[in-house]
Image (cartoon, grey):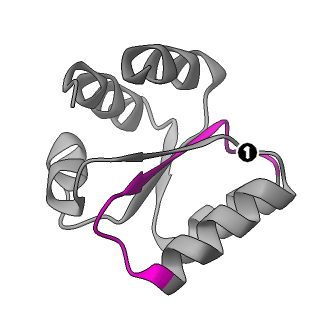
Amino acid sequence: MNNNYLNMVGLAYRARKCSTGEALIVKDIQAKKVKLLLIANDIAPQTKKKFIDKCNSYHVPYIEVDDRATLAQAIGKSERVAIAILDGGFANKIQSLLS
């Protein structure tokens, strides 16, 4: 997978344009703040279904990316199963790097 998107995720995190943590991400999706959701490919099936269902009902794009360790390393935190991008510019750039 193209790892240039991880640099953008790190920049977005340092710019405070990301949210992490299952409960906070769901809350931000419901508040229509999330522009793109990055989901780890080794996430638990129930959690994955929960995120995908929320994204579909609130029309939020999502992309399944690398494993949780790689996602966490991009933002300098311990294992993260998902990262919500809250800025449209970062979301568009990350989508273009992943496509």
Write down the quadrant of residue 43 in the picture.
bottom left
- Residue at 66%, 40% (x, y): give it: 61
The 10 Å Cα crowd at callout 1, few under 14, some 14 to 19, many 20 or more, is some
- Measuring 55% from the left and 26% from the top, which residue is drawn there? 91
Residue 27 sits in quarter: bottom right
Residue 48, image x, y percentages: 51, 72
Reply above or below: 18 against 53: above
Nearer to the camera, 16 or 54: 54
At 16% from the left and 50% from the top, the residue drawn is 70
**Residue 26 on image: x %, y %:** 66, 68
Horizontal side of 45 relative to 65 (left or right) equals right
- Residue that mark 1 sits on: 60
- Tell me where residue 15 appears, x and y as whole percent: 42, 29
Residue 93 lies, in percent from the top left, at: 48, 14
| Three-letter amino acid code of the residue under disc 1 | Val
- Give the magenta part as a residue range: 32-45
Q: Quadrant of the N terminus?
A: top left
**Is 46 above or below relative to 13?**
below
Q: Is label 1 in a helix, a strand or a loop?
A: loop
What is the quadrant of residue 6 in the picture?
Answer: top left
> Is-magenta flag for residue 36?
yes
